[in-house]
Amino acid sequence: MNSSTASAVIDLKDVTKTYASGELSVQALRGITFSIQPGEYVAIMGPSGSGKSTLMNLLGALDRPTTGTYKLDGIDVATLNDNELAKIRLKKLGFIFQGFNLLARTSAIKNVALPLFYAGLSPRARNDAAIQRLKEVGLGDRLTHKPNELSGGQQQRVAIARALVNDPAVLLADEPTGNLDTQTSEEIMGLFQSLNAAGRTIIMVTHDEDIAHHAKRIVRVRDGLVVADDLTAAATV
């Protein structure tokens, strides 16, 4: 699947990750190879202990492979120091979490604008970009609301707007519907499909088969290896 890696936004080749545990070493990833092209919508699935959390950390440039290569938008992550890793996360990746990770006493606008503060934009530019992204996710009428004044689904929309605000190459979503009811989960999946239809590259980790099948491709991980990599029915819609 997706053997062409020249234009890949995500490209992993024979990636392993080994952790030291006392005198023992634990091999969380045992040779992962796959690539993701710009504009793809991919779900990553696997049971507890499969290595998918380790894989997500690597994809998010929060860690480096022990061996093998991981290129993010053409950049070999293993060659970067900690400061460079932080910069590539800020520039290339948008993160969406199960727990939303919003600042509790801060308005939707300021929550969304926060990554732009670290990117060095002016207050006005940060504000304008945050408003644009909140409108994009359907929250143009909730700009000044704080998280406790928003439903769970609205909080996740704020988190998605924040992930989008730097115009990242890839959206990484870790169990994005884990704290939401079924109807709200479907609404968030509808938003993801709209974002993907507009050209956004999305990688989503989920344990939920129904949620995974909203993606166009499912990569299944078990015992530190990719055991399946298939298109879904959504890919033909």
Image (cartoon, rainbow, N blue to C red):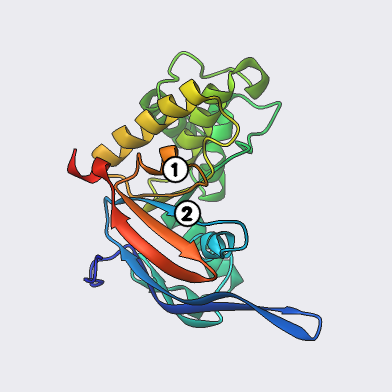
Q: Position of residue 133 (x, y in %)?
A: 41, 31
Residue drawn at (27%, 59%), measured in percent from left and top?
A: 37
Residue drawn at (56%, 63%), measured in percent from left and top?
A: 50
Looking at the rendered structure, the secondary structure element under dot 2 is strand
Looking at the rendered structure, the secondary structure element under dot 1 is helix
Say if 170 sits above or below 134 in the image: below
Res 211 quadrant in image: top left
Depth check, front residue: 153 or 49: 49
- Which quadrant holds the C terminus? top left
Q: Position of residue 137 (x, y in %)?
A: 40, 27
Q: Left or right? Give the position of 82 relative to 214.
A: right
Q: Mark 1 = which residue? A: 209
Res 47 quadrant in image: bottom right
Residue drawn at (44%, 36%), measured in percent from left and top?
A: 125
Residue drawn at (45%, 20%), measured in percent from left and top?
A: 139
Number of the label disc, if any, that sits on residue 45: 2
Q: Left or right? Give the position of 207 relative to 234.
A: right
Say if 217 sits above or below 116 in the image: below
Q: Amino acid at mark 2?
A: Met
- Mark 2 to mark 1: distance in Å? 8 Å
Q: Is residue 84 something that shows in the picture?
A: yes
Pick whichever of labels 2 and 1 is earlier in the sequence: 2
Q: Position of residue 169 (x, y in %)?
A: 36, 53
Q: Position of residue 66 (x, y in %)?
A: 56, 81
Q: Amino acid at mark 1?
A: Glu
Q: Left or right? Give the position of 72 relative to 63.
A: left
